[in-house]
Amino acid sequence: MRNPFSLVPEPFEIEELIEISFRRAFSRPKSIGKRRSLLSEIKAREISRMQSISDTISSKLDSIVKNFPNVEELDPLYRELLEVMGGIDNVKHSLGAIFWASRMIKRLLRYYSSRIRREDDPERMAELRSEFLGRAASILRRVRREIDFLRELIPRLKELPDLDTSSPTVIIAGMPNTGKSTLLSKMTSKEPEIAPYPFTTKGLIIGHREVPSLGTVQFVDTPGLLDRPLAERNEMELQAIAALRHFRGPVLYLIDPTETCGYNLTQQLSLLRELIETLEKRYLAVLNKLDLFDDFRENFMRVEDELGRIGVRSLRISAEKGEGLDELLENLEGLLKGNRGEGSIPLIR
Ligand SMILES: Nc1nc2c(ncn2[C@@H]2O[C@H](COP(=O)(O)OP(=O)(O)OP(=O)(O)O)[C@@H](O)[C@H]2O)c(=O)[nH]1
Ligand SMILES: [Mg+2]
């Protein structure tokens, strides 16, 4: 599914919009026509300047409102992402404010045009035109907060990937630094994000893989989740939760038994239990960083014991070294086909 926000234009900064519209209006002085009197020509020029300003501003504002998808008709996943990233009420309020500003400026244009038409004094006409400019600018400044809000939000919405909740999907979840993005890049054709510093995932990332028996399988890499109540979760975590709620596929829960991710086993298991209790899914626990097994043998065993107790099947891999990935894929294939098979992962709740 195409990102529904991809066509929404990014709003201009208010002062920039004012400047652009004013510059445009004054950069094309009309030549004085032969058949017109000087007075009627001046009148026409002032009106056309105002018209140009109103058109520039309104078309920019209206195209945001017009191209913003109807919130009520949004796919539930994108709707939840919009709620998490901006708040649907804030978005509606801001779009409403922009629509209001555009309408007010058009109304001002009508008012000042008719006043100028009734004037005979060129100086007075210029005064009225300036008055129009001042009032139009002040209307725009009244919606500065709303425009700034959308200026921050829209580029982030446009960066959301194309998400398809109906095709076979595996969701990769876990605490930060457990190796989710490394695994995504190994399982799919998704190039790893290259950064000179440790890269933490800030939004949903999608990779695809062709699986002969299933066709294209989508892998969703999610931002790291912390072990804390929903109400305390930040925006990035809530994006991960939105993906968990709306994609129907199995959850690949990544665990770092070496604890080098910065979170201990108790925290990583407690988060898994929390997810199991709150989200009805098939869970596969994947113990990563197997290349460090010799130094963390006891931790690997401890997690496996604990997972056995709560009835979640587990596998060992090293995402970085590419170990255990064939077996992982086989298990995922089984889960995606809804084939529980012998000794496979229990369907939780
Ligand atoms: N030794 C070892 N390190 C790994 C392995 N997989 C990932 N790492 C390292 O773990 C660190 C975190 O990896 P990421 O893939 O960015 O982890 P993430 O879970 O996506 O992190 P967030 O996006 O912050 O939630 C990086 O330094 C990786 O190189 C592995 O199999 N073995
Ligand atoms: Mg990541």
Image (cartoon, rainbow, N blue to C red):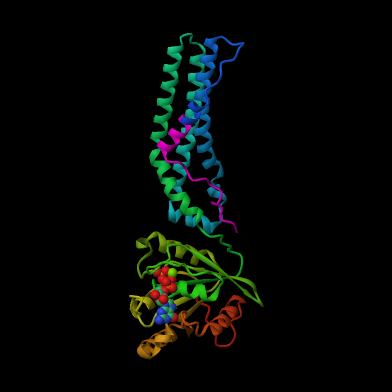
| Image side of residue 90 versus residue 30, left or right | left
Residue segment shown in magenta: 1-22
Residue drawn at x 38%, y 41% is: 145
Q: Position of residue 126 (x, y in %)?
A: 44, 17
Q: Does residue 329 lie above or below 135 as drawn?
A: below
Q: Is residue 144 magenta?
A: no
Query: Where, quadrant-wise, is the N terminus in this rendering?
Result: bottom right
| Image side of residue 30 versus residue 232, left or right | right
Say which of 25 and 187 sits in front.
25
Within the image, what quadrant is residue 212 found in? bottom right
User: Which quadrant contains ligand 2?
Assistant: bottom left
**Residue 122 visible (yes or no):** yes
Residue drawn at x 46%, y 9% is: 121
Q: Position of residue 148 (x, y in %)?
A: 40, 43
Q: Is residue 8 magenta?
A: yes
Q: Does residue 247 lie above or below 267 as drawn?
A: above
Say which of 83 and 116 sits in front.
116
Q: Position of residue 139 (x, y in %)?
A: 41, 31
Q: Does residue 277 lie above or below 104 as drawn?
A: below
Q: Position of residue 261 (x, y in %)?
A: 36, 76
Q: Does residue 316 lie above or below 212 as drawn?
A: below
Residue drawn at x 53%, y 26% is: 28
**Residue 273 visible (yes or no):** no
Say which of 36 and 101 sits in front.
36
Residue drawn at x 39%, y 34% is: 141
Question: What number of labels is visible?
Answer: 0
Say which of 111 and 49 sits in front.
49
